[in-house]
Image (cartoon, rainbow, N blue to C red):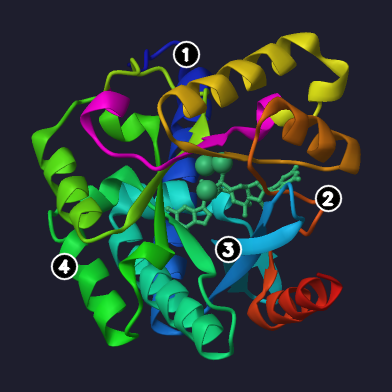
Amino acid sequence: RAKEDEPNSYHFYDNEMEQSIVRRLNMISDLKHAIEHDQFELFYQPKVHLASNTIVGAEALIRWHKDGSLIPPNEFIPVAEESGLINEIGKWVIETACKECAKWQKIGMKGLTVAVNLSPVQFKRGNLPTHIFRALQKYNLDPNLLELEITESLFIDNADHVKQQIHIMAEKGINFAIDDFGTGYSNLNYLTTFNASTLKIDMSFVRHMLNNPQQQHIVNAIIKMSRVMDLENVAEGVEDEQTAQELLAKGCVYGQGYFWSPPVPSDKFLRLLKQYANAA
Ligand code: C2E
Ligand code: MG
Ligand code: MG
Ligand code: MG
Protein backbone atom coordinates (compact mmCIF):
# COMPACT_ATOMS: atom_id res chain seq x y z
CA ARG A 1 0.00 0.00 0.00
CA ALA A 2 1.20 3.49 -0.78
CA LYS A 3 2.00 5.72 2.12
CA GLU A 4 1.65 9.47 1.90
CA ASP A 5 5.30 9.94 2.86
CA GLU A 6 6.65 7.48 0.27
CA PRO A 7 5.21 8.72 -2.98
CA ASN A 8 8.20 7.71 -5.11
CA SER A 9 8.37 4.09 -4.11
CA TYR A 10 4.67 3.77 -4.71
CA HIS A 11 4.88 5.28 -8.17
CA PHE A 12 7.89 3.20 -9.13
CA TYR A 13 6.13 -0.02 -8.18
CA ASP A 14 2.92 1.08 -9.77
CA ASN A 15 4.62 1.97 -13.07
CA GLU A 16 6.54 -1.24 -13.30
CA MET A 17 3.46 -3.31 -12.72
CA GLU A 18 1.46 -1.22 -15.12
CA GLN A 19 4.12 -1.59 -17.78
CA SER A 20 4.22 -5.34 -17.46
CA ILE A 21 0.43 -5.54 -17.65
CA VAL A 22 0.40 -3.31 -20.71
CA ARG A 23 3.13 -5.42 -22.34
CA ARG A 24 1.13 -8.56 -21.72
CA LEU A 25 -2.11 -7.05 -23.02
CA ASN A 26 -0.28 -5.89 -26.12
CA MET A 27 1.09 -9.34 -26.70
CA ILE A 28 -2.35 -10.86 -26.30
CA SER A 29 -3.76 -8.58 -28.96
CA ASP A 30 -0.73 -9.24 -31.18
CA LEU A 31 -1.27 -12.98 -30.76
CA LYS A 32 -4.94 -12.64 -31.72
CA HIS A 33 -3.83 -10.73 -34.80
CA ALA A 34 -1.25 -13.43 -35.52
CA ILE A 35 -3.90 -16.16 -35.38
CA GLU A 36 -6.17 -14.26 -37.76
CA HIS A 37 -3.38 -13.42 -40.17
CA ASP A 38 -1.60 -16.75 -40.27
CA GLN A 39 1.69 -15.53 -38.85
CA PHE A 40 2.71 -18.87 -37.37
CA GLU A 41 4.93 -21.46 -38.97
CA LEU A 42 6.02 -24.91 -37.89
CA PHE A 43 9.69 -25.81 -38.04
CA TYR A 44 10.75 -29.45 -37.98
CA GLN A 45 13.68 -31.03 -36.20
CA PRO A 46 14.71 -34.56 -37.18
CA LYS A 47 14.52 -37.42 -34.70
CA VAL A 48 17.41 -39.72 -35.55
CA HIS A 49 17.88 -43.45 -34.93
CA LEU A 50 21.37 -43.45 -33.44
CA ALA A 51 22.50 -46.90 -34.53
CA SER A 52 21.65 -46.38 -38.21
CA ASN A 53 21.90 -42.58 -38.41
CA THR A 54 18.52 -42.44 -40.16
CA ILE A 55 15.70 -39.95 -39.69
CA VAL A 56 12.64 -41.68 -38.27
CA GLY A 57 10.49 -38.66 -37.49
CA ALA A 58 10.38 -34.99 -36.65
CA GLU A 59 9.33 -32.73 -33.82
CA ALA A 60 7.19 -29.79 -34.88
CA LEU A 61 8.22 -26.53 -33.18
CA ILE A 62 6.23 -23.34 -33.58
CA ARG A 63 7.63 -20.00 -34.77
CA TRP A 64 5.94 -16.61 -34.98
CA HIS A 65 6.67 -14.23 -37.86
CA LYS A 66 6.10 -10.85 -36.27
CA ASP A 67 7.00 -7.62 -38.07
CA GLY A 68 9.79 -9.28 -40.01
CA SER A 69 11.38 -11.13 -37.12
CA LEU A 70 11.06 -14.70 -35.94
CA ILE A 71 9.85 -15.02 -32.36
CA PRO A 72 10.77 -18.24 -30.52
CA PRO A 73 8.05 -20.08 -28.57
CA ASN A 74 9.49 -19.41 -25.12
CA GLU A 75 8.70 -15.73 -25.69
CA PHE A 76 5.01 -16.12 -26.44
CA ILE A 77 3.75 -19.58 -25.38
CA PRO A 78 3.52 -18.54 -21.69
CA VAL A 79 1.28 -15.58 -22.59
CA ALA A 80 -0.72 -17.76 -24.96
CA GLU A 81 -1.24 -20.18 -22.06
CA GLU A 82 -2.30 -17.54 -19.54
CA SER A 83 -4.76 -16.00 -21.97
CA GLY A 84 -6.18 -19.28 -23.22
CA LEU A 85 -5.13 -18.45 -26.79
CA ILE A 86 -2.97 -21.59 -26.72
CA ASN A 87 -6.16 -23.57 -27.45
CA GLU A 88 -6.58 -21.83 -30.78
CA ILE A 89 -2.85 -21.88 -31.57
CA GLY A 90 -2.55 -25.50 -30.48
CA LYS A 91 -5.37 -26.53 -32.80
CA TRP A 92 -3.54 -24.93 -35.69
CA VAL A 93 -0.31 -26.71 -34.68
CA ILE A 94 -2.03 -30.12 -34.59
CA GLU A 95 -3.74 -29.55 -37.97
CA THR A 96 -0.57 -28.34 -39.63
CA ALA A 97 1.62 -31.11 -38.23
CA CYS A 98 -0.86 -33.83 -39.29
CA LYS A 99 -1.10 -32.32 -42.76
CA GLU A 100 2.68 -32.25 -43.12
CA CYS A 101 3.13 -35.79 -41.83
CA ALA A 102 0.47 -37.04 -44.27
CA LYS A 103 2.42 -35.34 -47.04
CA TRP A 104 5.62 -37.18 -46.05
CA GLN A 105 3.79 -40.52 -46.31
CA LYS A 106 2.51 -39.61 -49.77
CA ILE A 107 5.96 -38.79 -51.12
CA GLY A 108 7.31 -42.13 -49.97
CA MET A 109 8.67 -41.36 -46.51
CA LYS A 110 6.52 -44.12 -45.07
CA GLY A 111 6.40 -44.45 -41.30
CA LEU A 112 7.94 -41.06 -40.61
CA THR A 113 6.37 -39.77 -37.39
CA VAL A 114 5.54 -36.27 -36.24
CA ALA A 115 5.72 -35.07 -32.63
CA VAL A 116 3.62 -32.17 -31.36
CA ASN A 117 4.12 -30.31 -28.07
CA LEU A 118 1.02 -29.87 -25.94
CA SER A 119 0.42 -27.39 -23.15
CA PRO A 120 -1.40 -28.58 -20.00
CA VAL A 121 -3.92 -25.78 -20.71
CA GLN A 122 -5.08 -27.67 -23.79
CA PHE A 123 -6.47 -30.42 -21.54
CA LYS A 124 -8.72 -28.07 -19.55
CA ARG A 125 -11.70 -27.87 -21.91
CA GLY A 126 -11.91 -31.61 -22.43
CA ASN A 127 -12.28 -31.47 -26.21
CA LEU A 128 -8.64 -32.05 -27.12
CA PRO A 129 -9.18 -35.68 -28.26
CA THR A 130 -12.01 -34.54 -30.54
CA HIS A 131 -9.79 -31.95 -32.23
CA ILE A 132 -6.96 -34.41 -32.62
CA PHE A 133 -9.15 -37.18 -34.04
CA ARG A 134 -10.67 -34.69 -36.46
CA ALA A 135 -7.22 -33.66 -37.73
CA LEU A 136 -6.11 -37.28 -38.13
CA GLN A 137 -9.25 -38.06 -40.07
CA LYS A 138 -9.04 -34.97 -42.25
CA TYR A 139 -5.58 -35.93 -43.49
CA ASN A 140 -6.15 -39.66 -43.29
CA LEU A 141 -3.18 -40.05 -40.97
CA ASP A 142 -2.47 -43.22 -39.00
CA PRO A 143 -2.70 -42.31 -35.27
CA ASN A 144 0.48 -44.33 -34.74
CA LEU A 145 2.39 -41.68 -36.64
CA LEU A 146 1.41 -38.95 -34.21
CA GLU A 147 3.32 -38.47 -31.00
CA LEU A 148 2.12 -36.01 -28.38
CA GLU A 149 4.74 -34.46 -26.12
CA ILE A 150 3.59 -33.61 -22.63
CA THR A 151 5.54 -32.66 -19.54
CA GLU A 152 5.48 -34.04 -16.02
CA SER A 153 3.70 -30.88 -14.86
CA LEU A 154 0.53 -32.19 -16.48
CA PHE A 155 0.35 -34.86 -13.78
CA ILE A 156 0.93 -32.66 -10.74
CA ASP A 157 -2.79 -32.50 -9.90
CA ASN A 158 -3.31 -36.15 -10.76
CA ALA A 159 -6.50 -35.05 -12.47
CA ASP A 160 -8.93 -37.67 -13.71
CA HIS A 161 -10.04 -35.67 -16.73
CA VAL A 162 -6.42 -35.48 -17.91
CA LYS A 163 -5.94 -39.22 -17.55
CA GLN A 164 -9.23 -39.89 -19.30
CA GLN A 165 -8.32 -37.78 -22.32
CA ILE A 166 -4.90 -39.40 -22.58
CA HIS A 167 -6.49 -42.81 -22.31
CA ILE A 168 -8.96 -42.11 -25.11
CA MET A 169 -6.17 -40.94 -27.39
CA ALA A 170 -3.74 -43.74 -26.47
CA GLU A 171 -6.47 -46.30 -27.20
CA LYS A 172 -6.61 -45.04 -30.77
CA GLY A 173 -2.89 -45.62 -31.13
CA ILE A 174 -1.54 -42.12 -30.52
CA ASN A 175 1.84 -42.19 -28.78
CA PHE A 176 2.80 -40.09 -25.79
CA ALA A 177 6.25 -38.82 -24.92
CA ILE A 178 7.32 -37.24 -21.65
CA ASP A 179 9.22 -34.12 -22.69
CA ASP A 180 12.07 -32.61 -20.65
CA PHE A 181 12.14 -35.77 -18.57
CA GLY A 182 14.08 -35.39 -15.33
CA THR A 183 13.36 -31.70 -14.79
CA GLY A 184 9.91 -32.00 -13.22
CA TYR A 185 8.99 -32.35 -9.59
CA SER A 186 6.14 -34.80 -9.72
CA ASN A 187 6.52 -38.28 -8.32
CA LEU A 188 7.04 -40.94 -10.94
CA ASN A 189 3.89 -42.82 -10.13
CA TYR A 190 2.09 -41.33 -13.11
CA LEU A 191 4.32 -43.42 -15.36
CA THR A 192 2.69 -46.57 -14.08
CA THR A 193 -0.87 -45.35 -14.52
CA PHE A 194 -0.77 -44.22 -18.10
CA ASN A 195 0.86 -45.65 -21.17
CA ALA A 196 3.64 -43.32 -22.17
CA SER A 197 5.68 -44.69 -25.02
CA THR A 198 8.76 -42.49 -24.79
CA LEU A 199 10.97 -40.56 -22.38
CA LYS A 200 12.73 -37.56 -23.83
CA ILE A 201 15.88 -36.93 -21.82
CA ASP A 202 16.11 -33.21 -21.18
CA MET A 203 18.94 -31.45 -22.94
CA SER A 204 20.22 -29.92 -19.71
CA PHE A 205 21.61 -33.41 -18.92
CA VAL A 206 22.79 -34.14 -22.44
CA ARG A 207 24.42 -31.05 -23.88
CA HIS A 208 27.53 -30.99 -21.72
CA MET A 209 27.44 -34.54 -20.41
CA LEU A 210 30.86 -35.49 -21.79
CA ASN A 211 32.53 -33.10 -19.35
CA ASN A 212 30.17 -33.75 -16.51
CA PRO A 213 30.06 -37.12 -14.68
CA GLN A 214 26.97 -36.13 -12.65
CA GLN A 215 25.00 -35.46 -15.79
CA GLN A 216 26.19 -38.74 -17.28
CA HIS A 217 24.93 -40.57 -14.20
CA ILE A 218 21.51 -39.02 -14.66
CA VAL A 219 21.47 -39.87 -18.37
CA ASN A 220 22.49 -43.45 -17.55
CA ALA A 221 19.75 -43.74 -14.95
CA ILE A 222 17.05 -42.43 -17.30
CA ILE A 223 18.16 -44.78 -20.08
CA LYS A 224 18.12 -47.76 -17.70
CA MET A 225 14.74 -46.77 -16.36
CA SER A 226 13.27 -46.45 -19.86
CA ARG A 227 14.51 -49.96 -20.72
CA VAL A 228 13.17 -51.52 -17.54
CA MET A 229 9.81 -49.89 -18.13
CA ASP A 230 9.83 -50.83 -21.80
CA LEU A 231 9.75 -47.23 -22.97
CA GLU A 232 11.56 -45.68 -25.89
CA ASN A 233 14.08 -42.97 -25.18
CA VAL A 234 15.19 -39.87 -27.05
CA ALA A 235 18.12 -37.69 -26.02
CA GLU A 236 17.50 -34.00 -26.67
CA GLY A 237 20.18 -31.42 -27.33
CA VAL A 238 22.83 -33.63 -28.96
CA GLU A 239 25.30 -31.11 -30.35
CA ASP A 240 28.30 -33.23 -31.41
CA GLU A 241 29.20 -36.63 -32.76
CA GLN A 242 31.02 -37.77 -29.64
CA THR A 243 27.92 -37.23 -27.52
CA ALA A 244 25.84 -39.15 -30.06
CA GLN A 245 28.26 -42.08 -29.91
CA GLU A 246 28.40 -42.04 -26.13
CA LEU A 247 24.60 -42.06 -25.97
CA LEU A 248 24.44 -45.03 -28.32
CA ALA A 249 26.98 -46.88 -26.17
CA LYS A 250 24.84 -46.16 -23.10
CA GLY A 251 21.82 -47.77 -24.74
CA CYS A 252 20.01 -44.66 -25.92
CA VAL A 253 18.05 -45.34 -29.09
CA TYR A 254 17.12 -41.96 -30.60
CA GLY A 255 18.59 -38.48 -30.59
CA GLN A 256 17.66 -34.96 -31.54
CA GLY A 257 19.93 -31.97 -31.71
CA TYR A 258 22.00 -29.45 -33.60
CA PHE A 259 24.53 -32.20 -34.45
CA TRP A 260 22.06 -33.42 -37.08
CA SER A 261 20.00 -30.28 -37.60
CA PRO A 262 18.29 -27.42 -35.79
CA PRO A 263 14.54 -27.11 -36.38
CA VAL A 264 14.05 -26.00 -40.01
CA PRO A 265 11.13 -24.93 -42.25
CA SER A 266 9.18 -27.73 -43.95
CA ASP A 267 10.86 -27.39 -47.38
CA LYS A 268 14.30 -27.52 -45.84
CA PHE A 269 13.28 -30.53 -43.77
CA LEU A 270 12.25 -32.31 -46.98
CA ARG A 271 15.67 -31.63 -48.48
CA LEU A 272 17.27 -33.01 -45.34
CA LEU A 273 15.15 -36.17 -45.61
CA LYS A 274 16.24 -36.73 -49.20
CA GLN A 275 19.85 -36.13 -48.28
CA TYR A 276 19.72 -38.77 -45.53
CA ALA A 277 17.78 -41.21 -47.72
CA ASN A 278 20.42 -40.92 -50.43
CA ALA A 279 23.26 -41.40 -47.96
CA ALA A 280 21.73 -44.59 -46.56
P1 C2E B 1 11.02 -28.65 -26.35
O1 C2E B 1 9.78 -29.30 -26.80
O2 C2E B 1 11.79 -29.32 -25.27
O3 C2E B 1 11.90 -28.47 -27.67
C1 C2E B 1 13.30 -28.54 -27.73
C2 C2E B 1 13.92 -27.16 -27.85
O4 C2E B 1 15.34 -27.32 -27.86
C3 C2E B 1 13.59 -26.43 -29.15
O5 C2E B 1 13.55 -25.03 -28.84
C4 C2E B 1 14.79 -26.74 -30.03
O6 C2E B 1 15.02 -25.77 -31.02
C5 C2E B 1 15.90 -26.74 -29.02
N1 C2E B 1 17.01 -27.59 -29.43
C6 C2E B 1 16.97 -28.71 -30.19
N2 C2E B 1 18.18 -29.24 -30.33
C7 C2E B 1 19.04 -28.46 -29.65
C8 C2E B 1 20.47 -28.51 -29.43
O7 C2E B 1 21.18 -29.39 -29.89
N3 C2E B 1 20.99 -27.52 -28.64
C9 C2E B 1 20.22 -26.52 -28.11
N4 C2E B 1 20.83 -25.60 -27.38
N5 C2E B 1 18.88 -26.45 -28.31
C10 C2E B 1 18.31 -27.41 -29.06
P2 C2E B 1 12.35 -24.11 -29.36
O8 C2E B 1 11.95 -24.49 -30.74
O9 C2E B 1 12.74 -22.70 -29.11
O10 C2E B 1 11.16 -24.51 -28.39
C11 C2E B 1 11.20 -24.26 -27.02
C12 C2E B 1 10.04 -24.87 -26.29
O11 C2E B 1 8.82 -24.25 -26.68
C13 C2E B 1 9.83 -26.34 -26.61
O12 C2E B 1 10.72 -27.15 -25.87
C14 C2E B 1 8.38 -26.55 -26.23
O13 C2E B 1 8.26 -26.76 -24.84
C15 C2E B 1 7.78 -25.19 -26.57
N6 C2E B 1 7.06 -25.30 -27.86
C16 C2E B 1 7.55 -25.28 -29.11
N7 C2E B 1 6.56 -25.42 -30.03
C17 C2E B 1 5.42 -25.55 -29.32
C18 C2E B 1 4.03 -25.76 -29.69
O14 C2E B 1 3.66 -25.88 -30.87
N8 C2E B 1 3.12 -25.83 -28.66
C19 C2E B 1 3.50 -25.75 -27.35
N9 C2E B 1 2.56 -25.83 -26.40
N10 C2E B 1 4.79 -25.57 -26.98
C20 C2E B 1 5.73 -25.48 -27.95
MG1 MG C 1 9.19 -31.12 -27.21
MG1 MG D 1 12.33 -30.89 -24.34
MG1 MG E 1 9.68 -28.13 -23.24
Does the beta carbon of the residue at mark 2 sit less than 8 Å from ligand 1?
Answer: yes
Q: Nearer the viewer, mark 2 or mark 4?
A: 2
> Marks 4 and 3, how far apart in space?
24 Å
Taking the spot 80% from the left edge, 39% from the top edge, the residue there is 244
Q: Position of residue 234 (x, y in %)?
A: 59, 41
Is residue 94 rendered to the left or right of residue 106?
A: left
> Under tag 1, what secondary structure?
loop
Question: Along the line of sight, which residue is nearer the eye, 93 or 274?
Answer: 274
> Under tag 3, what secondary structure?
strand
Q: Nearer the viewer, mark 3 or mark 2?
A: 3
Where is mark 1, residue-wise?
6
Question: What residue span does the magenta drawing correspond to?
Answer: 190-205
Q: Quadrant of residue 126?
A: bottom left
Q: Position of residue 186 (x, y in %)?
A: 35, 19
> Under tag 4, what secondary structure?
helix
Q: Which quarter of the figure is the C terminus placed in?
A: bottom right
Amino acid type, mark 1:
Glu
Mark closest to the chain's N terminus, 3 or 2: 3
